[in-house]
Image: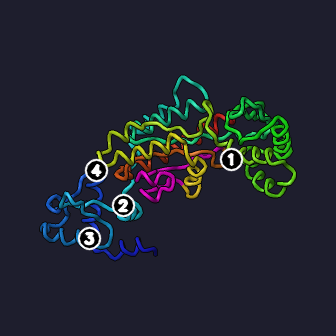
Amino acid sequence: MDDKAKILSEMNDRSREVFRRVVEGYLDSGDPVGSRTLTRTMSEKVSAATIRNVMQDLEFLGLLDSPHTSAGRIPTQLGLRMFVDGLMEVSTLSLQDREAIDATTGGNEPGVASLLDRVGQALSGITHGASLVLTPKHEAPIRHIEFVSLGHDRALVVLVFADGHVENRVFAPPPGQTPSSMREAANFLNALAEGRTMSELRAHMTHEITRRRQELDAAARALVESGLAVWENPGESHERLIVRGRANLIDQADEADLERIRTLFDDLERKRDIADFLELAEAGDGVRIFIGSENKLFSLSGSSLVVSPYMNADRKIIGAVGVIGPTRLNYGRIVPIVDYTAQLVGRLLSGERKG
């Protein structure tokens, strides 16, 4: 039993109820919850003084905090985590939310990208947070890779897949590149890429670059190593992380939170750590909740993230959907929304790829 579960198991019924009602009140209103408010909602008749004593005990345990401007209490990050893990009641997906999500399948624009954009719009609208949708990579085997110079500080990498799909991505190459180094780098990559998908190539490249460093001159080696990042670089038509609903975060933020929201926006604009975002979803089964600093991608903004992977017909994780917002998210409602959305996307993409 971990420390959080031990604390919860040792709390008596009154302490547990006070704790639960403070957290639920805070998640509902965003305001500190006072003892007088709780006297009107407790299942047993107790005085405000008794409730204050319980609150002080919970504060001593690190579960509640007392903002200096108020006599009420709010949950700490530890308190929110303990509530989510041990006391939260996950609601059933409402018919209204289900219909809003299902409506994303009926758009006029065909294709995976437009579907996932509609999913993102629906998620942000339903949850009043910002939605994150990580789109699938193109996972056909690679047939050919070529580098094309566009100037001293810009180059194009052309990826030709075995199924005929072609992607062109512009990136900033390392300095000192020549037509010869670009050919050498492309030849090296093509020798490794044969029959491999993009993700397989990335894993193989890391090992081979270390093992065969002496086979490449310095310029070509730098280009190959920068190529590891090229596959994740955003291009105008190849964004892998779709973000919708930023305005919702501003609407929910008070003045003290605006700087943290700006930090979050900076992270989202740079589409940082896309691979890590998928790792968060892959590391657990189903929906995962990251609260405040637990969220390594957006910890500086103090935001919470509810995320779930989605799978293809082979039960392989190919992307993820999530909702990000203040720690005062309605977790019990958002969890089934994210879960249902991830399952729906997985079914739709599996059907499309079979068809």
Where residue 262 appears, as percent x and y from the top left, is: 41, 43
Instruction: Point out the stretch of residues depicted in magenta.
Output: 286-312
Percent position of residue 220, x then y: 80, 44
Q: Residues within 10 Å of mark 4 (few under 14, many from 20)?
A: few
Q: Which residue is mark 1?
A: 314
Q: Residue at x 67, y 36 (%)?
A: 171
Residue named by callout 4: 28
Disc 1 vs disc 2: which is toward the camera?
A: 2
Under mark 2, the amino acid is Leu
Q: Is residue 184 visible?
A: yes
Q: Which tag, 4 or 1, sits closer to the chain's start?
A: 4
Query: Which residue corresponds to the image point at 85% horizontal and 49% vertical from the top-left?
Result: 216
Q: Residues within 10 Å of mark 1 (few under 14, many from 20)?
A: few
Task: Quadrant for residue 355, please give it.
Answer: top right
> Is 304 within the magenta?
yes
Find residue 300 and report its horizontal and vertical position in percent: 44, 53
> What residue is pinned by disc 3?
15
